[in-house]
Image (cartoon, helix red, strand yellow):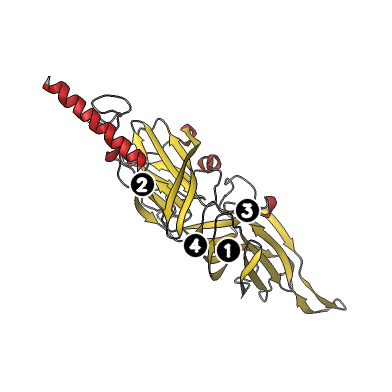
Amino acid sequence: MRQITVFFTLAIAAVFLLSFNASAEPEYENPDLELKFNLKEEGDMLSPQTKLPSDPEATKTVNAQYSNNFGVVRSDRQPVNVGTWTSDPVEFGIAISIKSFDIWWEDTEGSDDSCEWTIKILVNDQEVSEDTSGCQHDGDGIAKATHNLATDVTLNTGDTLGMNLVYEGWDDIKIYYDNSTYDTGLNIVGKHNFFFAPTWSGSTVTIEFAEAWPVNWDTNLDGGYIMLMGDEMYMADNSKANVEKGNEYTLSTANGSADVTSVIVKWNEVSGNGIRLMMDYNSFDHAMGGNNTNGTAGNPPILTINLQKASGALGDEGGLLGLPGFELMIAIPAIAFVARRYRTN
């Protein structure tokens, strides 16, 4: 009789804890992360979405404008509009800091480094800043030029972010963009993502998050931009992961509240130990130590999260006293952000 009483007491306590957890505001983290907002070929979009490494880059030829005096002397060069790229409307209000602009380009006529680039930042198609700087490289071959920016912008739900690019020079050039390698775009720091407490139960790991600018996580799984890594170089199989529409939340933010719909990524048949989520929007070094195989410094992901497996009272296969569906959710820790990297180049 005493064993039965203890059994039901624990079961009722578990139900109470689960009910309390469901009614309270969900546990989440909203860290500062730096994302690359790529210039996209399709629809002239500005987006954190990156193509797969096997996908080709986009190119655009920009013809210099100037007066050609008898075909001998060039004078009176003019600015040339390269293009305008605009993001999707933001899903929730966010304050962002635009740190820099990277552009891959080459001079197709010679190597004249006396050009100028003008970068204009737009909110809802209205200009909010303008920066002008030199070539940053001489154009001899394809290379990346980085232009430092310092523009802070607050976006409300539904606002769009854009940029306009202008080139002024003596030579025709070609720019390279919309590619995993040729990552032409803006480097932007902000609280782009809400991360909810992950779950690891049995052989299933579930990650839930909401994004200010949603991207295609099926593509990112295929590209290995998000991975589950473990001890002894264990790597979960992304082909056994699926992406689902998540839950709707109203979350507290610094300037009010945000209505968000989450994304859920779920891995099945996870068998490793010491599991970590390693997440980015582009390729990164999968080595735990952050080094490439040749020993040089690697490119770590923008975010690494340590996971802890849920334990039932009588084991780790999901169940209070062996009852399915009664996991001790209080055993799931808060998200531990063990690595963040702000990219400046």
The residue labelled by disc 4 is 95
Find residue 46 and report its image quarter: bottom right
The residue labelled by disc 3 is 178
The numbered mark, 2 or 3, whose residue comes first in the sequence reads 2
Q: CA distance from mark 4 to mark 2?
A: 21 Å
SS of the residue at dot 3? loop
Task: State the image coordinates of residue 242 (x, y, percent, origin top left).
Answer: 49, 34
- Of tags 1 and 4, the one toward the viewer is 4
Is residue 91 shown left or right of residue 3?
right
- Of tags 2 and 1, the one toward the viewer is 2
Q: CA distance from mark 3 to mark 1?
A: 12 Å
The residue labelled by disc 1 is 102
Identify which residue is drawn at 26% across, 24% down: 322
- Of tags 2 and 3, the one toward the viewer is 2
Q: The residue under label 3 is which amino acid type?
A: Asp
Q: CA distance from mark 4 to mark 3?
A: 25 Å
Identify which residue is drawn at 28% across, 31% down: 15
SS of the residue at dot 2? loop
The numbered mark, 4 or 3, whose residue comes first in the sequence reads 4
Question: Residue most toward the top?
Answer: 1
Task: State the image coordinates of residue 78 (x, y, percent, origin top left).
Answer: 76, 75
Task: State the image coordinates of residue 291 (x, y, percent, origin top left).
Answer: 40, 53
Q: The residue under label 4 is which amino acid type?
A: Ala
Find residue 332 and report its image quarter: top left
CB atoms of marks 2 and 1 within 8 Å: no
SS of the residue at dot 4? strand
The residue labelled by disc 2 is 27
Is residue 71 shown left or right of residue 117?
right
